[in-house]
Image: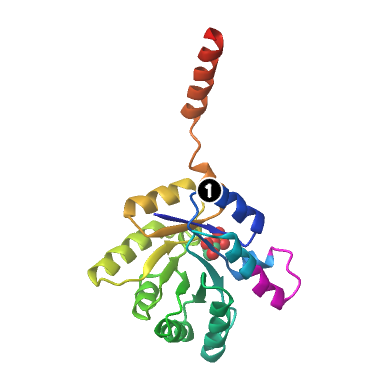
């Protein structure tokens, strides 16, 4: 299972990389807006800086902000030329599907984002997207079941041998990651905190305290 970090923050990416379990980075316009980036051109430099932080890690999803086909493909091509690790993130919509098809034919990797339904996920696969990003947490937030959607996408992709990789996004807590692992999806993208929370267990803490205490008593 691939672990991606959902952030545009360089320090956070460095910390995640230092853990040695990072496979890639995903960003979105909201995450980019949180960073101290002064203008639109600097956003491009920021993506390159993220890519340059990664060595063995696979890729960095950079999202387009255009909303019509011609602009989408132009922006997508521009982003893809920034660095070989860039995956062009495109929101699901009719123009988005056309843009994914166009870019995929040119061997440009895409990540179909803002996916909340099975139908959207089928279209993402049909258009040749490299990733599909169903938003788990945002579905849970509105009392819908994000994990059920992910299970359904996995089954349907297997039925038709679709090659699109499922990248579960909008992860809120460790159980989301664990349940995604049980379903057997390709990857999750998560805030660093949630990944770090996976390591925590009270019995580990008390167990370690006791080991050290016993050792100190004797030696
Ligand atoms: O990057 C897309 C997705 O992971 C956003 O997550 O927490 O804003 O719902 P969130």
Q: Residues within 10 Å of mark 1 (few under 14, many from 20)?
A: some
Q: Which residue is mark 1?
A: 194
- Residue at the farthest front position: 55
**Residue 215 drawn in magenta:** no
Q: Is residue 85 above or below residue 181?
A: below
State the image coordinates of residue 88 (x, y, percent, origin top left). 51, 75
**Residue 37 drawn in magenta:** yes
State the image coordinates of residue 183 (x, y, percent, origin top left). 33, 54
- Residue at the farthest right position: 38
State the image coordinates of residue 201 (x, y, percent, origin top left). 48, 33
Report the front residue among 97 and 217. 217
> Residue, x 26% and y 66% (percent of image)?
158
Q: Is residue 157 left or right of residue 215?
A: left
> Residue, x 45% and y 67% (percent of image)?
133
- Mark 1 lies on a secondary structure that is helix
- Residue at the farthest top position: 218
Query: Considering the image in quadrants, where does the N terminus appear?
Result: bottom left
């Amino acid at each position: 299972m691939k672990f991606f970090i959902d952030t545009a923050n360089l320090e956070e990416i460095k910390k995640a990389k230092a853990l040695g379990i990072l496979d890639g980075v995903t960003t979105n316009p909201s995450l980019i807006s949180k960073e101290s980036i002064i203008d639109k051109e600097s956003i491009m430099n920021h993506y390159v800086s993220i890519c340059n932080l990664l060595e063995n890690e696979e890729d960095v999803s950079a999202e387009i902000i255009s909303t019509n086909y011609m602009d989408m493909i132009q922006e997508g091509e521009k982003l893809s030329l920034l660095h070989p690790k860039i995956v062009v993130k495109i929101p699901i919509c009719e123009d988005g599907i056309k843009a994914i098809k166009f870019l995929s034919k040119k061997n440009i990797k895409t990540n179909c984002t803002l996916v909340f339904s099975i139908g959207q996920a089928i279209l993402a696969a049909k258009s040749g997207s490299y990733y599909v990003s169903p938003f788990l947490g945002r579905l849970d937030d509105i009392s819908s079941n994000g994990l059920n959607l992910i299970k359904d996408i996995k089954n349907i992709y297997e039925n038709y041998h679709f090659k699109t990789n499922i990248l579960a996004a909008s992860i809120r807590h460790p159980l989301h990651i664990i349940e995604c692992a049980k379903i057997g999806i390709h990857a999750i993208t998560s805030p660093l905190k949630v990944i770090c929370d996976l390591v925590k267990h009270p019995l580990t803490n008390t167990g370690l305290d006791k080991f050290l205490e016993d050792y100190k008593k004797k030696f």
